[in-house]
Image (cartoon, rainbow, N blue to C red):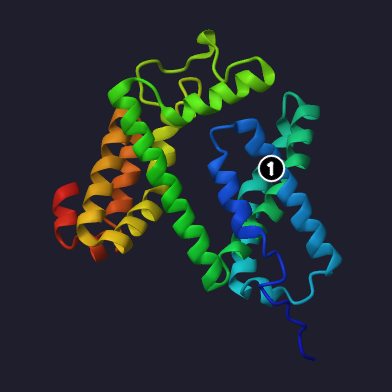
Amino acid sequence: MNEVRIEPARALRWAPGWVLLVVALWPLHGIATALLAAGALVGLAELALRRFRGGLGLMSGPAWALTGVLFAAYWLPELLSLIGAADWTHGLRKVLSDILVLPLLWLAAASVAVARGRQIVFSGLGLIALVWTVDALVAAGTGTSPLFWLLDRGRLALLGQPLCLPQEVDAPGRLAGVFGPCNPKLGIVLASLSPFALETAGRRAGGIGWWLAALAIGVVVLLAGARAAWRHMRWCCCGRAGARWAGAGCWRCWR
């Protein structure tokens, strides 16, 4: 029996843009979380309306299997932990709400299932990381992140409340960039996005662009004060993209 296939251009065609929008809004945690939940529900509804027909038109069989395994590895321990939970009601709510992780994984995988989607998502993530890097370098030199200042002024104008109150400052003295002093996650986020940023820089400007991007991101990660992020970035820079754009010198530099 022939399987009905869904053309990627028609099914979940909004998924790549949704992924980039969620990442770009990470500094606004509440909005990003709401967008995540909304995307999961809309994606699940679209798949349900199509009754999951033509699944291989959205993703390959291994991709469907991988998302299922990743979800099980994340969600089943949560479910089993309910057995000895001190606050059973809170734990149950958490377990039920985290079921949305599965359609989130489906959406993320579907967004990069075809070449055009991969190009949009990977290039977009690289550009986001590079913009955040430049913003952080400006913040290191001037003491103010232009992007965080704009977000803070916008929230103040709309809600009459800043993004970060003085008593909520976490880890003062660390470079926080667009995430602000109340959410010092810049280092680990940039380290995680660095493969996309370095690939984008290398593709647009060759080895020189790769090295400049690696140096800039490395400085920001160091100033952000996240040791785990620095180790993570070393792995990223010495991966396949690093060998492609920076040559053997990459390994000697980071060893």
Residue at 72 percent across and 44 percent down: it is 37
Please state the horizontal and vertical placement of residue 36, each as a whole percent of the image.
67, 44
| Residue in the foreground of this view, choosing between 108 and 158 | 158
Please state the horizontal and vertical placement of residue 22, each as a whole percent of the image.
60, 45
Residue at 69 percent across and 54 percent down: it is 102
Mark 1, other Cα within 10 Å: few <14 / some 14–19 / many ≥20: some
| Residue in the foreground of this view, choosing between 72 and 99 | 99
Q: Is residue 107 left or right of residue 211?
A: right
**Could you say whether the residue bearing mark 1 is in a helix, strand or loop?**
helix
Q: Residue furthest front?
A: 157
- For the N terminus, which image quadrant? bottom right
Q: Does 120 sit above or below residue 35?
A: below
Please state the horizontal and vertical placement of residue 45, each as a whole percent of the image.
82, 57
Q: Does 50 sit above or below residue 97?
A: below
Q: Which residue is mark 1?
A: 35
Q: Is residue 22 left or right of residue 251?
A: right
Report if residue 48 is visible in the image. Answer: yes
**Tag count:** 1
